[in-house]
Image (cartoon, rainbow, N blue to C red):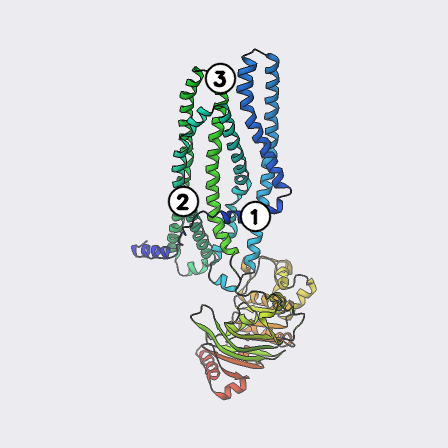
Amino acid sequence: MSRRMDSKVMKRFQYSTDQVIDKPFNWQQMLRLFSYMLPYKNNLVPLSITMVLITTAVRLAIPILIGVYTLDQAIKQKDGNMLITLVAIIAGLYTASYIANRYRIRWMNQLGQNVILDLRKHLFAHVQGLSHRFFDQRSAGSILVRIMNDINSLQELFTNGVINLLMDMVLLIGVFFILFSLSPQLTLAIMVILPIMFLISTKLRKKIRRSWQDVRMKQSKLNSHLNESIQGIRVTQSFTQEKENMAFFDGVNQETFQSWKSASQKNAMFRPLVELTNALGTSVLIWYGASLIQHGTISIGIFVSFAFYLGMFWEPISRLGQVYNQLLMGMASSERIFEFLDEKPIVSEAESAVELEDIKGEITFDRVVFSYDEKRTALKGISLQIKAGQTVALVGHTGSGKTTIANLISRFYDPTSGIVFVDGHDLKRVSIQSLRKRISIVLQDTFIFSGTIYDNIRFGRPDATDREVKEAAEAVGAAEFIEKLPKGYDTEVEERGNILSVGERQLLSFARALLADPKILIMDEATASIDTETELKIQSALKTLLNGRTAIIIAHRLSTIREADHIFVLENGLLIERGNHQQLMELRGEYYDLVQAQFNMLDAV
């Protein structure tokens, strides 16, 4: 690969890298995350906590039984019966601990999986309700990362981290009080080294958190690029850009690998730190403890119990470091999850929204102004009226505002100023669901879902019968090719309908829209991808199917728009001409020029 190509790839990668935001640890956000456990506060949570308390109580009791009672009393006094009793008690406690641990793990796994299920469901449902602008500004890959990877990264936190945090805190407090009761002098001597460990670990926390946040950023870019590459593989191969694409992927992949490596290395520094502290504490125990034994301050049994408890003291501290690292990872992921959950739709439901039970389909634009990005105005004071049952065509050059009008009718966006009415109802005061149930849209780039032909046609009306599906397919001329498929209407189509031709996918979208029986039908360049022969097949069907419906047709083909009752001609967001085909041709304005240009192009061909 050339050096020039390398520089292009690096430049492309450089501009596609997100910035890591440096914020302090947000406990309020973590509490918000833990609130997803509240639905289980009456079953799984108390059961798990009970098992934790049983396990912790057993662990705290055993060193006392071994050191103070077994060594200092049973063995020292050569009391065989007492020794047998203590062995039986200790064996029983270990059995109880085993049973409690078994159920704790089972119930905590159930709790963690339920929380992950609820969180993913909540996030997906929220994303489903966001406005089109949200999806305009983000790649499908980055959205996928939030719903899958970021939520998956919380799994360990909910299945083990939270309950381990509780268990270790209880264990630490219990061990500290027992150690202090056994020997205050020895306890204070050993605890002197704790401030050193906390001082060093505190400096690691910020670096660890930033590292895991960076990992999430890199994963998002990797997934976005993978999604883009798979979706655009035909374009990549057509322009022979496989090498550059691989080079870019290698750059993203290497960055992801390096970010994981860096985060893992910083994570790995904490445990050795605890082990070093443990070694220092053990050294103090042996040196100072031996001195106390020689002076008769403590017994051998207390010394042994102390050694057990000291090991138990460092163990939860080490695990608390791991839990804190899980919290840091959870913090990085939750920031990204809650960023989406806090996203508000720009098209929101009014508090007292009107439910549209039925509509005639009359549409009015009253001095409508609209801008997608507050910089370029897409519509500039548009006023028009479309009567119920009328078929109108929107004509104009690319970027003139045709699709924007369709988007406003479906209320995918709200006007910057002005009002859009349907049957006299201001759309801002209408229930979004009730409006869209009465509108069907056929796009140029139709989307076919994985499933059968039946599933795809009845997508907008799931309760439709097989007969109704077939009638809709026959009405638009799709039945002919469907019946030739291996299993007819039961044929499974792959993602995006790759086994179907462009024209066949378009016909399916016609059948899907018409089965929904809409009062308003929007066709945005719907026949652009259909060949002339196929178009002729559906023209006669469209005349019947559009009867009684308000139809908005966006098209460049003269054959598609000339039969419209009314034609609106747009240019740079302005409505410059209106009338039927004959009237506009006689006007010899912009519409006339568009038609002549199309004829000249056909003649050249």
Residue identified by numbered label 3: 299
Residue 29 position (above or below residue 313): below
Task: Tell which tag, 3 or 1, sits nearer the viewer.
Answer: 3
Question: Which numbered disc, 1 or 2, marks the residue that appears first in the sequence?
Answer: 1
| Labelled disc at residue 35 | 1
- How far separated are the C-alphas under marks 3 and 2? 44 Å
In the displayed image of the protein, which residue is found farthest to the bottom? 586
Q: Does the residue at mark 3 contact the one at mark 2 (Cβ under 8 Å)?
A: no
- How far separated are the C-alphas under marks 1 and 2? 25 Å
- How far separated are the C-alphas under marks 3 and 1? 48 Å
Q: Secondary structure at mark 2?
A: helix
Residue identified by numbered label 2: 206
The total number of labels drawn is: 3
Question: Which numbered disc, 3 or 1, marks the residue that appears first in the sequence?
Answer: 1
Q: Position of residue 398 (x, y in %)?
A: 46, 73
Q: Secondary structure at mark 1?
A: helix
Q: Does the residue at mark 3 contact the one at mark 1 (Cβ under 8 Å)?
A: no
For the residue pair 582 and 551, the one nearer the viewer reads as 551
Residue 565 position (above or below residue 433): below
Q: Residue at x 60, y 25 (%)?
A: 93
Q: Amino acid at mark 2?
A: Lys
Q: Quadrant of residue 235?
A: bottom left
Q: Residue at x 61, y 39 (%)?
A: 107
Q: Quadrant of the C terminus?
A: bottom left
Q: Position of residue 102 (x, y in %)?
A: 60, 33
Q: Residue at x 48, y 35 (%)?
A: 319
Question: Which numbered disc, 3 or 2, marks the residue that appears first in the sequence?
Answer: 2
Q: Amino acid at mark 1?
A: Ser
Near mark 2 (Cα within 10 A), the count class, few <14, some 14-19 or many ≥20, is some
